Image: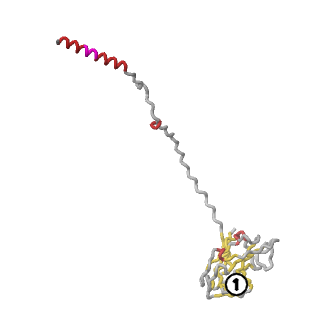
Amino acid sequence: MSHHKKIIRSSLFIFSLLLITIMVACEPEDESIGTIPTIAPEFSVPTPIPTFTALPTLTPIANPTATPELPLKTILIYDNKFEPGWGLESEDVFVETSDEITFDGDQALKVSPRLAFSRLFIVANSDNRQPVFREDIIAVSFYLRSSEPIAFDDMTITAQGSNDNIYWLENDRSAFTTSDVYFADTQLSFLGLGTIPADTWARVEFLPQEQQFDPVYRNFTGFFLSNASTFLDTYYIDRIEILVVDE
């Protein structure tokens, strides 16, 4: 009986080995062996970023040589008195000197308008020997004051000029064109001034070269002030001068 069992066990062992051998032989070959797997696009190796060559260091540009300032000089017209070659003309105004109210020095011009649109001329006279060319003028300036406020439209200033003379003449029409372009009146507001408070000196600066509506002229011969109908009060003028290029 035991011999029979040994035979059965030996047969089972041989059968098991045979079955394992058959199973191994039938198993499909692993195709992945020796093949590089494909990498999904989202895991692809990124393209290397190119290397940029550094820009060369810029050489600083030297500061250009500053343009030399133009030499300037002041032509004094009035300070205590009129300088030789200059004076005044009046139209419906009364003018005198005052030592009570002055800006600079001992005397100022005291002007009392009699009518609306009266005129006070500050002009070169026939004794003038020093021409003032319009193109050389930087600014005409003077100081203005009244015991009453001077509103921005209470007064105007008007240039005077000539192409024939270096002094003012009432009937000089050498600057007028055939279309009769006259010198333009300019309100104080266009000179950057608002209302001048009472009893206050204000510096008025007038630029003849910027008067676009004036006729073409060569020689600056002065200017005049005119009061509106809204202003008939006495006013004062002091320290009148012209700043010009000194060539």
Q: Quadrant of residue 134?
A: bottom right
Above or below residue 173? Residue 61 is above
Q: Give the total number of marks visible in the rendering.
A: 1
Residue bearing the label numbered 1: 229
Magenta stretch in the rendered image: 11-15
In percent of width and height, residue 84 lies at 71, 80
Task: Choose between 99 and 172: the one closer to the eye.
Answer: 172
Q: Does the magenta-highlighted stretch encompass residue 168?
A: no
Task: Choose between 183 and 167: the one closer to the eye.
Answer: 183
In percent of width and height, residue 170 lies at 79, 80
In percent of width and height, residue 190 lies at 66, 74
Q: Secondary structure at mark 1?
A: loop
Q: What's the residue at 78%, 75% (across, down)?
A: 165
Task: Choose between 218 and 51: the one closer to the eye.
Answer: 51
> In the picture provided, is 38 more to the left or to the right than 24?
right
Q: List the single residue furthest toward the right.
A: 178
Q: List the single residue furthest toward the front.
A: 1
Examine the residues drawn in magenta and state their main secondary structure: helix
Quarter placement of the C terminus: bottom right
